Amino acid sequence: MAELGKKYCVYCLAEVSPLRFRCTECQDIELCPECFSAGAEIGHHRRYHGYQLVDGGRFTLWGPEAEGGWTSREEQLLLDAIEQFGFGNWEDMAAHVGASRTPQEVMEHYVSMYIHGNLGKACIPDTIPNRVTDHTCPSGGPLSPSLTTPLPPLDISVAEQQQLGYMPLRDDYEIEYDQDAETLISGLSVNYDDDDVEIELKRAHVDMYVRKLKERQRRKNIARDYNLVPAFLGKDKKEKEKTLKRKITKEEKELRLKLRPLYQFMSCKEFDDLFENMHKEKMLRAKIRELQRYRRNGITKMEESAEYEAARHKRERRKENKNLASSKRGKDDGKDGEFAAIENLPGFELLSDREKVLCSSLNLSPARYVTVKTIIIKDHLQKRQGIPSKSRLPSYLDKVLKKRILNFLTESGWISRDAS
């Protein structure tokens, strides 16, 4: 016979005095938590019937091993308090739970069980949807401090600062980009009687002002990145000469001018890397064409290429001499006086007929021509082998003479067209 005052499960007959589930549709049907969770049915009772939780107040929600021994009645009072007083008001919540709990105990229990516990992990997602965005965060938001944080001051003299109207402590100029941008918000004020249209209009003004601030800062960053201030002051020429790794060709200068609008989308380093990679691509394409020419002529090893080039030059020289000899047969003897100005100079006998014509037309002595020719061919061979070299041409060789000699050596096959 059941002891007086105790309650038992009608399905498994276990004692359910601390906590039981009572069916609201069937009479005298009370189940233990295990049978209720398993969906036990008995008599007219069905698992989909409504139920009522009957708690004696002594049941522990987290089990007897939980720290503090909080009963289900205290847990219910704690949840009511967090809803009523809000997170953080631990003194009011402790008073609502009961005198037996201190504010420190209430805080530790709620944080450990409902936030960092299994219940919190299951209910609180990693990314909270529809969360209010913190526009004051330092990650580039509309009101981010990064918009107004000044860059390091420019390293310029006081006279140069006055010339530019630059204020180093604020990193500002007396005349900024879009100088009248502040007029958009200078007269704004928030009033309690503003309607929705007025509020949206004021927000639009703030948004326009923020966009102008971003554009102003972007232009400052571009000027810093590409050293436009030293360029304006004429101080970047010496720095460019120090950092210049290779000579920029005329074609590359023209291409840089055409691609100047891309400066605003790329940093200075990225832009330099772009042209450096384009130069490498050009050199690789020239090398590939040279290797393909070797392959077409049966050259499969680099050691054989030197012999091939030497034999090719000999063939070209014989061809030139043959053409010159045939052209001289149809000319009178008065032609021999063409080289009278240089035929008695040293090195005349080392020149081919075409070279004699070149030296005579340029009014260049044979010895000087041989010196310039040797330097140009030596630099060309070093570049083909990947050896960096700096050409030291004589001072008496101006641009016109150099261009004529380079064209002559290219047409004669002494150097390749890519090198010229």
Image (spheres, helix red, strand yellow):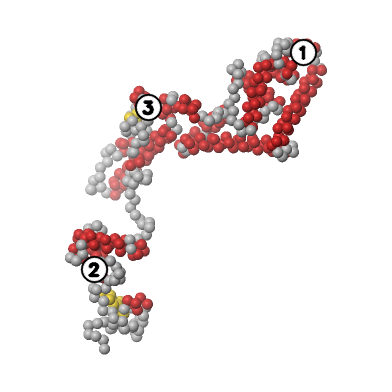
- Report the side of 59 relative to 40 (left or right): left
What amino acid is at disc 1? Lys
Going by the numbered disc 2, the residue's amino acid type is: Glu
Is the residue under label 1 in contact with that under label 2 (CB below 8 Å)? no
Q: Position of residue 104 (x, y in %)?
A: 23, 60
Q: Which residue is mark 3?
A: 156
Identify residue type, mark 3. Ile
Q: Residue at x 61, y 35 (%)?
A: 283
Would you say the residues marked 1 and 3 are in contact, meaning their CB atoms lie under 8 Å apart? no
| Label located before the other in sequence (2 or 1) | 2
Query: Which label was assigned to residue 335?
Result: 1
> Which residue: 60% across, 35% down?
282
Q: Is residue 293 visible?
A: no
User: Which of marks 3 and 1 precedes in the sequence?
Assistant: 3
**Residue 418, picture quadrant:** top right
Distance in Å between CA atoms under marks 2 and 1:
124 Å
Residue 261 position within the rendered picture, expressed as x and y whole percent measured from the top left: 48, 35
Question: Which quadrant of the figure contains the C terminus?
Answer: top right
Q: Which mark is residue 74?
A: 2
